Image (spheres, rainbow, N blue to C red):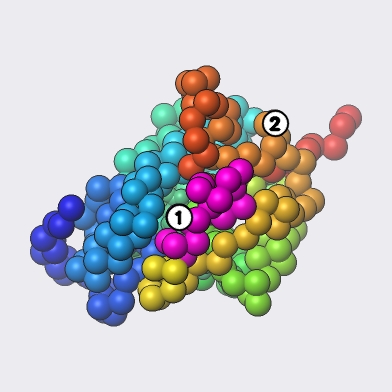
Amino acid sequence: MVAEDRQPVPDEPDVDLTRPNAARMYDYYLGGDAHFAADREAADRALARFPHAAGSARANRAFLDRAVRACLQKGIRQFLDLGSGVPTVGNVHEIAHHHDPEARVAYVDNEPVAVAHGDRLMAENPLVTVTLADLRNPREVLAAPGVAGLLDFRQPVAVLMVAVLHFVSDEADPTGIVATYREALPAGSALVLSHISDDQPTEELAAPHRAVAEVYRTSSTPAHLRDYPAIAALFTGFEVLAPGVVDARHWRPDEPRALEQDPCGFYAGVGWLPRPSA
Ligand SMILES: C[S@@+](CC[C@H](N)C(=O)[O-])C[C@H]1O[C@@H](n2cnc3c(N)ncnc32)[C@H](O)[C@@H]1O
């Protein structure tokens, strides 16, 4: 699975491409072209320890798709996608615009290559923005022109933190970060979240996630595994929609037989801020 580096693009940001990075490794798992030799080398080491990594990434993306559709069904038309990654198939704005061409999507990522790819793709779309920012600074993110200038926080917003909080250390206080975003949201808003975990039903299912986390230690984006209670606690202040916080593969699957498949390793859920009853 070794691809040639694609041609550099004129507005490519100046980043250290000699160190692997989660955004570009994830793009490699998903078959994109926004990765470089160091990313592929690290991703191949991860795949050697967890051959299902690519399937797991796809299961996470499929959860994202179903969760965004669930938000649309709840009447939400605005999305703040934090840690959005390199644009790939089934981006949030594509899912949302399929249901409502007027939906607004603000993408945020702190990886310059991912943001450059997003910028090029979305440049012509006034309902979509891409912002280079660190989600660990919620006030800066919420005030950024691409976020504050696009989203109306008097109307419901779905905040997406999909496969990203495991890149946030305990010291950075992920629970406090989520709470700050929650406080900015009106009733009728939602939190869509997934998080990798080694808290799995068997040691055989758990061990590969620890081995992969070891690989990420060498990257610019070390991973922090959390257990199920710590991940469920990230939904504090939200009403968790059925079926609760479960393996991403098992969250409202389109195909019922997915419930019989092994977990993909991401715990996932959708939290909701109920509207006050009349
Ligand atoms: C595994 S990818 C997930 C992409 C997408 N959310 C998905 O689930 O398909 C994680 C993304 O989070 C981004 N990321 C990691 N830490 C971040 C931070 N502190 N602020 C913003 N983005 C971050 C990475 O650059 C990467 O693009």
Left or right: residue 173 compared with residue 87: right
The amino acid type found where label 1 is placed reads Pro
Spot occupied by residue 177 in the image (x, y as percentages of width and height): 67, 66
Q: Residue at x 65, y 56 (%)?
A: 227
The image's mark for residue 67 is: none
For the C terminus, which image quadrant?
top right
**What residue occupies the far right of the structure in this picture?**
278
The span from disc 1 to disc 2 (Cα, nearest Å) is 28 Å
Q: How crowded is mark 2: few (under 14 residues within 10 Å), some or many (20 or more)?
A: few
Q: Which quadrant of the figure shows ligand 1?
A: bottom left
Residue span colored magenta: 196-213
Q: Residues within 10 Å of mark 1 (few under 14, many from 20)?
A: many
The amino acid type found where label 2 is placed reads Ala
Q: Mark 1 points at which residue?
A: 208
Spot occupied by residue 85 in the image (x, y as percentages of width and height): 39, 57
Q: Depth check: 60 or 228 in front?
A: 228
Q: Depth check: 204 or 32 in front?
A: 204
Figure check: 152 above or below 210: above
Q: Which residue is drawn at 52% across and 26% down?
A: 260
Q: Is there a contact, CB below 8 Å, between mark 1 and mark 2?
A: no
Magenta stretch: helix, strand or loop mostly: helix
Q: Which residue is drawn at 50% across and 48% down?
A: 204
The answer to whether residue 118 of the structure is visible from this angle is no
The image's mark for residue 242 is: 2
**What residue occupies the far front of the structure in this picture?**
203
Q: Depth check: 103 or 216 in front?
A: 216
Left or right: residue 251 compared with residue 104: right
Figure check: 261 above or below 239: above
Spot occupied by residue 31 in the image (x, y as percentages of width and height): 25, 48
* Residue 239 figure quarter: top right
